[in-house]
Image (cartoon, rainbow, N blue to C red):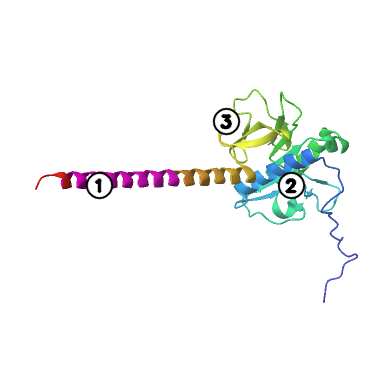
Amino acid sequence: MPLRYVREPRPDLFPTSEEVPETKRHLGLRTALFQILEAAFADRAAIGSEQFVYWDPTDPRQCCAPDVMLRLGMPDLLFDNWKVWEWGAPQLCIEVISKSDFDKGPWGEKLARYTSMGVEELVRFDADDADAPFTLWDRREFELVERDRSLPDYARCRTLDLYYCVKPDKRLVRMLRFARDAEGTDLLLTPQEERRRAEERRRAADEQRRAADEARLAAEARVRELEAELARRAAEQPR
């Protein structure tokens, strides 16, 4: 006998987007971060940008849309939204502060949402703050606790074993970046930077080949000159 129920299951009403104004600067900053992480970790992490993350299957209002999010240990899925009860919480989330962020409510409210989401490491980046452009939180027990700036390794990204750093940018003023070293010299590159570096390597290789070809031709010409000189001297010898 088939089972019967007093009501049907609730429909899956978890939106995939909302209409939120975004400046081009904000778009550029979050897109650069997303592309950097995608290029470096897409083979071993799911990476998103501005997709809703839901953590309560009974309440679609319990959500947040990180500017950048990442979860290691799985392929880079093409997800429309992220459901924590299916894939687990993101381990790293980054918020780029902009006017549109201020319009959506105070930071404390957003921090509470990230706490409920279950994220392990949270970054708040403010490109207009020249003194302390990024602030970090780590999950301790059941809450997100702000990291002490006096720590020697304050800027280390514990999720990825990298370092946060801020670099000047002609168009965006300042960019949050990831580096392999604490000094911020060995950067993870944007796709545009990677293409420029590949082009520079190609031009350098072409120049080396041209220099080698010129040196070879010059050596061959010198050999021919010596051979011609030896032949001339031999012809001048009395018989």
Q: Which residues are magenta?
A: 209-234
> What kind of residue is marked 2?
Ser
Instruction: Tell me the quarter of the picture where residue 97 sits.
Output: top right
Pick the front one: 139 or 38: 38
Query: From what the image shows, is residue 69 above or below residue 75?
Result: above
Q: Is residue 142 magenta?
A: no
Circles 3 and 1 in contact, beta carbons < 8 Å: no
Count of numbered tags: 3
Residue located at (65% from left, 48% from top): 38
Q: Callout 2: few (<14), some (14-19), or many (20+) C-alpha neighbours within 10 Å?
A: some
Q: CA distance from mark 2 to mark 1?
A: 71 Å
Label 2, secondary structure: give it.
loop
Q: Which mark is residue 85?
A: none
Q: Which mark is residue 49?
A: 2
Sequence order check, earlier mark of 3 and 1? 3
Q: Position of residue 178 (x, y in %)?
A: 62, 37
